[in-house]
Amino acid sequence: MKFLGNLVWLIFGGIIIAVEYFIGSLILMITIVGIPFGLQTLKMASLAIWPFGRRSYIKERASGCLFIFMNVIWLLCGGLWIAATHAIFGVLLCITIIGIPFGLQHFKLTEVALNPFGRDIEWI
């Protein structure tokens, strides 16, 4: 079932989202300062290409000033817009019964877009 959900996700826009994150990641990695942000967009691209059967969680050792500082910079430089876009798509998809699983995946991406530093993604 997860494979079928991921296949439908890819056909109806998941591949476009993942490619956009990947291109954004490459652009961010041009400068040395942008490398940490590029790595976070790569994390989001990997989740966007195959979201069913994966979850995002906060690492136990992810505490400290650096994670908070980087998440604040992330939010101010575009993370809030990315999260808002995923939240809007999630609400629109949850209007129909067929779109509910895909809306939930957008909500998962919203959670990662709000604070990507200190998060990890695992298979379930």
Image: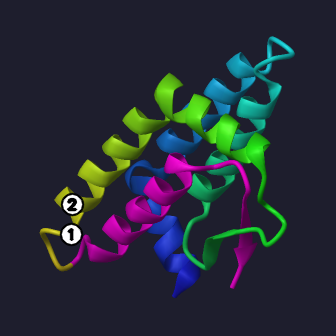
Up-down: is 49 above or below 94?
Answer: above
Residue shown at 40% from the left, 59% from the top: 106
Which residue in the structure is indicated by mark 1? 94
Magenta-drawn segment = 98-124
Q: Is residue 13 among what the camera can see?
A: yes
| Residue assigned mark 2 | 91
Q: Label 2's element?
A: helix
Q: How far apart are marks 1 and 2 (CA)?
A: 5 Å
Query: Which x, y percent locates residue 90?
Result: 29, 59
Examine the rendered structure and indicate whether residue 115 appears above or below residue 51: above
For the image shown, how many numbered marks are present on the structure?
2
Residue drawn where x is 50% and y is 78% of the image: 4
Q: Would residue 106 be counted in the magenta stretch?
A: yes
Q: Which residue is drawn at 49% across and 36% down?
A: 79
Q: Nearer the viewer, residue 88 or 19?
A: 88
Q: Is residue 10 visible?
A: no
Residue 91: image location, x then y, percent? 21, 60
In the picture as drawn, the residue positioned furthest to the top comes out as 31
Q: Quick check: 26 above or below 37?
A: above
Q: Answer with the quarter of the image where residue 82 lies.
A: top left
Q: Quadrant of residue 21?
A: top right
- Count residues near mark 2 (Cα–Cα under 10 Å), then give few for <14, some for 14-19, many for 20+: some
Amino acid marked by disc 2: Val
80 and 27: which is toward the camera: 80
Amino acid residing under circle 1: Cys
User: Would residue 85 be found to the left or right of residue 36 on screen?
Assistant: left
